[in-house]
């Protein structure tokens, strides 16, 4: 995790990462708040969201430096160090994801893949109408919305604490301090 210079703007999130992020937001918002469950559009948005996450996983291995998981993977040591810094009110802004942000990102991606898998299974002959699978799918959807809300709030709070433009950076790709 590279520290972010106080005066500089650093190109952090490449075009693919930003397109992935906002396309995934669109799929999730549409599927949870707009499209009725079980509709064909709901299924295709779910498949699109899953495909986006799978593409992001590939990009996390071969993509640009700040997109690579190796750059920000939330190891226990990184998480402990970050939490200790936050506890002492000296959390320095990082160029890429901080360990908690990385943990949230990976959690959100896992939830989307879980939703894709449970949604797909519900369309199969073997699992058609199986109640526990429908319940699991619904709960994963609710967890995804809760985590996404927490993610958005954390981006606002951490942006304020670290004096960085996190939301703007996910639009422009450049992370700046103020």
Image (cartoon, helix red, strand yellow):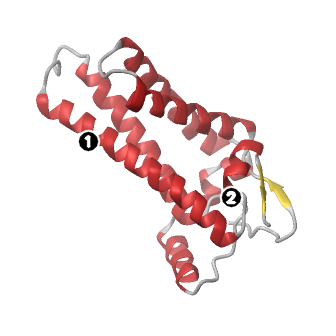
> Do residues under tags 1 and 2 come within 8 Å of each other at their CB atoms?
no
Q: For mark 2, what is the residue?
A: 96
Residue 113 lies, with reference to residue 127, above or below; the image says: below
In the visual, does 84 lie left or right of 70? left
Q: Residue 48 location in percent, x, y? A: 49, 24
SS at mark 1 in the image: helix
* Residue at point 84%, 59% (across, down): 9
* Residue at point 70%, 52% (across, down): 66
Q: Residue 67 location in percent, x, y? A: 67, 48
Q: Which of 86 and 125 is in front in this view?
A: 86
SS at mark 2 in the image: loop
Q: Which of 14 and 32 is in front in this view?
A: 32
Q: For mark 1, what is the residue?
A: 139
User: Is residue 73 visible to the viewer in this orientation of the structure?
Assistant: no
Q: Quadrant of residue 127?
A: top left
User: Is residue 104 visible to the viewer in this orientation of the structure?
Assistant: yes
* Residue at point 62%, 59% (across, down): 97
In the visual, does 103 lie left or right of 122? right
Dot placed on the residue nearer the N-terminal end, 1 or 2: 2
Q: Residue 153 location in percent, x, y? A: 52, 57
Residue 129 lies, with reference to residue 82, above or below; the image says: above
Q: Residue 89 location in percent, x, y? A: 60, 83
Residue 43 lies, with reference to residue 17, above or below; the image says: above
Q: Residue furthest front?
A: 34
Q: Residues within 10 Å of mark 1 (few under 14, many from 20)?
A: few
Q: How many marks?
A: 2
Which quadrant would the C terminus be assigned to in this image?
Answer: bottom right
Which quadrant would the N terminus be assigned to in this image?
Answer: bottom right
């Amino acid at each position: 995790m590279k520290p972010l210079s106080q005066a500089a703007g650093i190109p952090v999130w490449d075009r693919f990462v930003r397109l992935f992020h906002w396309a995934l937001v669109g799929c999730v918002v549409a599927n949870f708040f707009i499209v009725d469950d079980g509709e064909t559009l709901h299924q295709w948005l779910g498949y699109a969201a899953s495909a986006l996450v799978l593409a992001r996983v590939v990009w996390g291995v071969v993509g640009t430096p700040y997109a690579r998981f190796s750059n920000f993977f939330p190891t226990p040591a990184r998480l402990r160090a970050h939490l200790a810094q936050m506890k002492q009110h000296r959390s320095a802004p990082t160029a890429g994801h901080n360990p908690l942000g990385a943990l949230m990102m990976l959690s959100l991606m896992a939830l989307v893949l879980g939703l894709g898998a449970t949604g797909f299974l519900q369309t199969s002959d073997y699992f058609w109408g199986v109640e526990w699978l429908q319940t699991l799918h619904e709960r994963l959807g609710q967890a995804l919305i809760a985590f996404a809300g927490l993610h958005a709030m954390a981006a606002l709070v951490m942006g304020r604490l670290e004096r960085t433009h996190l939301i703007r950076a996910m639009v422009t790709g450049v992370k700046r301090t103020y």
